[in-house]
Amino acid sequence: MTALLLGALGLTLSLIVPGPLARAHWPDRAPAAAVLLWQAITLAAVLSALGVVLAAPEELTRALGSGKPVAAAALIGALAVAAVIVLRLLVSLWGVSRRSRARRARHRLLVDLLDRAEQRQELDAGHVRVLQGNLPLAYCVPGREARVVLSDGALRLLDREQVDAVLAHEQTHLRHRHEVVMESFTAFYRAVPAALRSRAPLDAVHLLLEMVADDAASKRTGPAPLRGALERLTDAVPLAEEVMPEEDSRRRRTARLAAPQRPSRMLTGAVVAAAVALLVLPTVILVVPWLGQALAVWPL
């Protein structure tokens, strides 16, 4: 019964919950807490899968009336399979992290070589790099030697307050290490079989992290400069028809900045409580009783 319930929970969290949650707009009011909820959902789905692997063989042998040696062998086999799953996740995380670090190192070298130092003197920020080009660009390159990259097209398009807002936005990404969060979700996504995964968490968490950075920048410069910068950058770089999710995310961000709301402590607390409950309750209610039964068949 434990394996069946954990399997149902894992499939629900992996295939059913991500779509509606990604389309919901209430996380816009508590983006940081919503990221925590997404992390809890992902981790709970993984733990549920491990629970199924561990519980199913032991429950099957117990239902068939097998002796302790058979039940113990089944439990050892289940532990081996669970170890393979964990190893696959760790290898995926290591691979994503390694490739990301290498890509960012090459990118930092490139922007340092192409930097137009004379155009960034008035920005008074040593980690900012300015690239030549009419296309307005603004992004960050995380890492130990982080960079915020602007194009001179962006500097011509934005006024000084808008540039400061963009810098504050990108610096929030760097300060809070948002790339680590995205790497973890990317690693889980790649490690899970295609039939059991959804891309919705990746896109939703990316948007929520942008909102977290928007909120931090708005506290420093006010929402109007950041909203103006976002609108100008969007108008200057028309989005192709096939990139509608990105267009939708910018529309949602602009709407938040146009009508800023005070953070809801009640909503944030409820979301954090839901995230904790999602990790704790299945373990306490389902796994602990099963563990007691499984240890009873272990040969002493």
Image (tube, grey):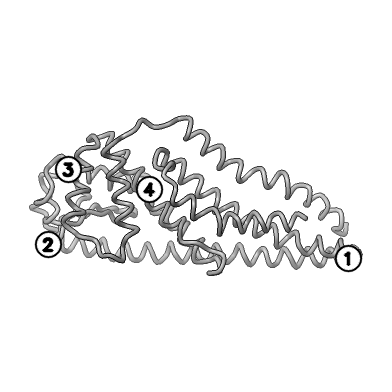
Residue carrying label 3: 162
Task: Give the distance between the C-alpha atoms of the residues marked 2 and 4, in whole angstroms.
Answer: 27 Å
168 above or below 145? above
Alpha carbon of mark 2 to alpha carbon of mark 1: how far?
Answer: 71 Å
Per the model, the C-alpha gap separating discs 4 and 1 is 50 Å
Foreground residue, 162 or 200? 200
Q: Secondary structure at mark 2?
A: loop
Q: Which mark is residue 300?
A: none
Q: Earlier in the sequence, mark 4 or mark 3?
A: 3
Q: Secondary structure at mark 1?
A: loop
> Label 3 sits on what residue type?
Gln
Q: Amino acid at mark 2?
A: Gly
Question: Where in the figure is residue 62, as x and y percent of width and height?
Answer: 86, 61
Label placed on residue 133 = 2
Where is mark 1, residue-wise? 64
Q: Residue at x 46, y 66 (%)?
A: 95
Mark 2 or 4, nearer chain start: 2
Residue position for label 4: 209
